Image (cartoon, helix red, strand yellow):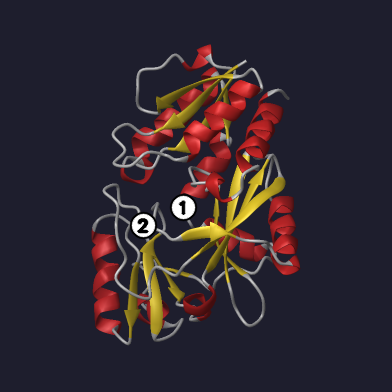
Amino acid sequence: MKLALVTSSGLSHPDADLPLLESELADLNIGTDIVAWDETVEWSGYDAAIIRSTWDYHRRLVEFDHWLTVASEQTQLWNSADLIRWNTDKRYLAHLSAKGLPTVPTQFIDRTEPQWHSQLLSVGDDIVIKPTVGAGSHGVRRFINQSEHAIAYAEQLMSSGKTPMTQPYLGDIDTYGEVGLVTAGGVLSHAFHKEAILNGEPQWSGDDHVVEVISAHTPTEAEQSLCDRVLLVLPATAYARIDLLPTMNGPMISEVELIEPSLFLEVDSDAAGRVARAFASVVRR
């Protein structure tokens, strides 16, 4: 069996997960090639292609969408093209909320609505605005009692063809940080803790990703339960990363990342092996 682990060309910093996965997959007698999605590749030469670090997709969405069609016609693509298309736009959060899952309250701004200014500011005085299509905290801004600046930023996003979304800034993140739950083959593999990034001036890498402070985390019962509930509403996945924010009423979903999330395999010595075995299992179906 041979797998393509799909990345981006010209990354400013390496995908730290890839060498760990290569090694574990080799131990399972599975050959791997690390290839960029926009390279000239005969995808039919692989038993499957697993998207890992296509971190530029949001800047080249039309091209990336075309690639999804081409690759999925030639080989198994994980996660599936349909699921990835659904996940590229964060309006999927409304779908999860409609399924009864606790998500961070979100307003999606439609410029044609006459009251969109009020809608934008309705979530509070301390808000986060970002485009619905983005990766690595690209385009994320926080506004505290700055309604005019918030509206101007939303207009800037819309002028560039993007759809803004706004959420309240949940202050407990400053104390407790954020939790990420990584699943492999539909089962929780490991978890990590991430320090807050919007309570100061974030540091940025060269490819529009915030430099993050990550450590190992043991999920609580509430976090595990919410993870299980999310997996129940998703189709089959090779991987998922469920990002949770703390609140007084329990964890809330900030994102469910199904495209190209970092899996932070280094936080758990057995994580790479679990994920590699899950990858082998799903592509052998």
**Secondary structure type for disc 1:** loop
Which residue occupies the foreground of this view, 199 or 260?
199
Residue 45: percent from left, percent from top: 52, 12
Q: Which residue is mark 1?
A: 89
Q: Residue at x 40, y 28 (%)?
A: 37
Q: Residue at x 35, y 22 (%)?
A: 39
**Left or right of 22 in this view: 280:** right
Is the residue 51 above or below the residue 262 in the image? above
Q: Locate the N terminus by quadrant.
A: top right
Q: Is disc 2 placed on a helix, strand or loop?
A: loop
Residue 259 appears in view: yes
- Image quarter hosting the C terminus: top right
**Among numbered discs 1 and 2, the one appearing first in the sequence:** 1
Reading the image, the residue beneath label 2 is: 211
Give the class, few, some or many, for how many residues have Cα within 10 Å of label 2's Cα (few <14, many ≥20): some
The numbered dot on residue 204 is: none
Residue most toward the front? 269
Q: Which residue type carries mark 2?
A: Val
> In the rendering, at what x and y percent does residue 178 appear?
53, 67
Q: Is residue 248 above or below residue 16?
A: below
Is 74 rendered above or below residue 120? above
Q: Residues within 10 Å of mark 1 (few under 14, many from 20)?
A: some
- Location of residue 261 in the rendering, given as x and y in whole percent from the top left corner: 49, 47
Q: How many marks?
A: 2
- Please name which of the two marks, 1 or 2, marks the residue nearer to the observer: 2
Q: Amino acid at mark 1?
A: Asp
Kindly indicate the quadrant of the structure image that contains residue 271. Answer: top right
- At horizontal 29% and vertical 57% (from top left) the residue drawn is 204
